[in-house]
Image (spheres, helix red, strand yellow):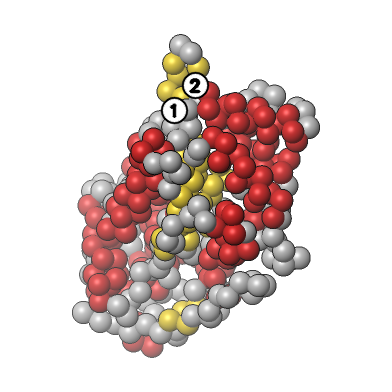
Amino acid sequence: MREPMERSERVLVKYPLFKATIARIQACFDSHDATAEPDCCPIVGESGSGKTTIISFFASLHPRVDHKWGLEVPVLVAKVPARPTVKSFAETLLYQLGDPLWSRGNTVSKSIRLRELLKRCRVRLLALDEFQHFVDVRQANIPNDVADWLKEQVEEARLAIVVLGLQRCLEVLRQNEQLRRRFGATLRVGAFRWDAKDDRTTYRAFLRAVQEQLPEYGMPSLSDLEMAFRMHYASYGLIGYTMKIIRGAARIARCHPRRQITLETLSQSFAEHVWSERLDDPNPFTENFDCDKAPPLTLPSARTCVPRVAVGHRSVGLELHA
């Protein structure tokens, strides 16, 4: 018998930006039957900013339903394959729709089957995660034939679209005018900034809400100013990294009878799940970490050079504030 998922793996905090993003996606979803041309929205943010969690939660609000006439898929979520071609993209969508022959046929026959399935499964919203895969950073080009193909399929099926990805995914829309005109304003989900009072307050409230959902674990108050600073420094203020550290610490603590999460536990979790990506930064959960002398942080996106896309190199200097 399969064990139920541990509580720490199921923690979900609906912070204000989470709620606003869900509302924006819902508006796109509702436009499917209400407008001649359904709404489309790009959602961009750092890796670890919670984009995938947000779209997965939205899809759970509109689950697949098995009817006598067949499968209904109100929200089709798919990850854009790396270096997509029309063939690989069509196969990805067919597979996600449950087509048992997803790899059979040529591009034309796959496109026809896809259009039929989108209508038969009553897909209202197509959510494409990892949309930055359209931008080939090695060759600095965008497969516009794939973007044109996507536009044709979506217009034929009259779908609302949400695309989610890193900042560079907007280059796809900039370079493809026909696709761009379908999209409204960009919604950005990013890191909470410690030097912005509202962000700092919201991040501390997020940590408090997470801790409230884990009553079986003994741990220091995560929302206290110094501990919140350590958590923020360890995670860049990104939800994904924050939860990685907390969930990793919970897994370690489950091996001990009292389920205690200490600075040492958090330090070990940080070392195992995050530090390998940022060896130049100190581990903020060690006893000798000085919050007042912590070196500035560089966000993950600023560490990667992306051709043809303007990505600012942001160093974030942090100081402890009440």
Placement of the C terminus among the 4 image quadrants: bottom left
Residue at (70, 31) in percent of width and height: 110
Residue at (29, 66) in percent of width and height: 203
The image shows residue 172 at horizontal and vertical percentages of 61, 60
What is the C-alpha distance between the residues marked 1 and 2?
7 Å
Q: Residues within 10 Å of mark 2 (few under 14, many from 20)?
A: some
**Left or right of 231: which side holds 322?**
left
Residue extending farthest front? 36
Tell me the element at label 1. loop
The image shows residue 276 at horizontal and vertical percentages of 57, 67
State if disc 2 and disc 1 touch (CB < 8 Å): yes
The image shows residue 287 at horizontal and vertical percentages of 37, 76
Task: Name the residue tied to disc 1.
Answer: 64
Between 52 and 260, the one nearer to me in the picture:
52
Q: From what the image shows, is residue 322 above or below residue 205?
A: below
Residue at (60, 46) in percent of width and height: 151
Task: Name the residue tied to disc 2.
Answer: 71
